[in-house]
Amino acid sequence: MFKKNHLILFLPINRGMEKKFKNKDLAVRLGVSGTLVSLVLNNKADQQGIRKDTQEKVLMLARQMGYYDSVSVKDEVSPTEEKPGVLAMVVPSLDDPFVNQITPFLQKAFATIGVGFSIVTKDPDDQRYDRLIGSFKKFFSGLILLGDTADDNTIRALKATDYPFILLEKSVKSLRFNTISTDSFAGANLVINHISKLGYKNILIVGDKKTILADTTAINDIINAIVQKPGINRPVVVDLEKPEAGCEIDSVFLEKFLRPPYRAEVMIIMNAGLVYPLMTLLRNKKLRVPQDIAVISMEEGAGFDLMFSPVTSLRKPFSGMSVKVANMIWSEVKNSGKGKFKRQVNIAPELVVRNSCGTI
């Protein structure tokens, strides 16, 4: 006979053999009480005020120990589906460097908790996407909306049906949603502190015309960080058309900032996709990096460490971010999209210093 609310966890070993785990086994591993474990596994943690990160740790270890793959115990109700199915990330483009860089980490994080992972591309010009929103629930247990895919129409459609979803690299100030983002302000301070130590005064910020609106917050964070450094001049912000493959950037808008009287000493590039075209432009203009102008990218890109002047860049915390994403969306699925507490998690990036910005 099993006591009421007493759950048994199973971990398959060898062939056909099972090792039983009780709540206290989980509790010992995590350093928490058996009561806390029971509350989490019975969907009563929120009512008792148990912290979300603690709930996630319990559920993560329960998944790893085989609880959700075990045979149901009589009179017990699993806190989530026996087979939660597949979770999907909706992305604006498969060409986005962020998508390519974080995907392997997300695959690993979801594999750890035994959940499938898929990617859906949203074409802003494709009206069929709007009609698909209502059908997502048939295919996916929950959604991760990346960046601008979290538009008002999509959010309203998902929220109306209590569909489990979270936002990645996107924040909506007017409403509270579960969001995970890179800490833009922390990244801006890392970059500007490094520039200040190097003694640069004139800064040129370069963005992509297509994404300049999305970059507004990050650019403002850079400007605010500069204001705190007396001795650095107010930066100049320029937005450029990203050239087609094999084409060069139109240098007309940059020319006056690369030569006296202003002459930028350091160029902060907002988008990884602009780095290679701009480095090519500087080389064609006979401007040496970093001797004539330093270069720092606010995004890490493939091959930055292999370029002629390896590029200093901000590296996003893909591993930690992916674990947070997996735990947060899983928590939403567990609560059928009706979780009371919404969290906004910001994770600081890392500044990877290479030759392109010079040395202190």
Image (cartoon, rainbow, N blue to C red):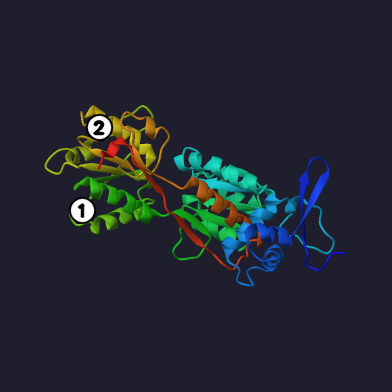
Total numbered badges shown on the rendered structure: 2
Looking at the picture, tell me which residue is in the foreground, 271 or 18: 18
Q: Residue at x 63, y 59 (%)?
A: 30
Instruction: Report how far apart the C-alphas of labels 1 and 2 lie in the structure.
Output: 23 Å
Is label 1 in a helix, a strand or a loop? Answer: loop
Q: Which residue is label 2 attached to?
A: 282
Q: Residue at x 55, y 40 (%)?
A: 104
Q: Position of residue 130 (x, y in %)?
A: 56, 51
* Quadrant of the rendering where the N terminus is positioned: bottom right
Q: Residue furthest right?
A: 1
Residue 277 visible in the shown view: yes
Q: Is residue 216 left or right of residue 19?
A: left
Q: Label 1 is placed on what type of residue?
A: Arg
Q: Residue furthest left?
A: 261
Q: Earlier in the sequence, mark 1 or mark 2?
A: 1
Q: Residue at x 53, y 60 (%)?
A: 178
Q: Which residue is label 1 attached to?
A: 234
Q: Position of residue 254 (x, y in %)?
A: 22, 39
Residue 163 visible in the shown view: no
Note whether 359 is above or below 141 in the view shown.
above
* Quadrant of the rendering where the C terminus is positioned: top left
Marker disc for residue 180:
none
Looking at the picture, tell me which residue is in the foreground, 130 or 343: 343
Q: Label 2 is placed on what type of residue?
A: Leu
Res 166 → quadrant? bottom right
Q: Position of residue 47 (x, y in %)?
A: 64, 72
Q: Position of residue 165 (x, y in %)?
A: 58, 56
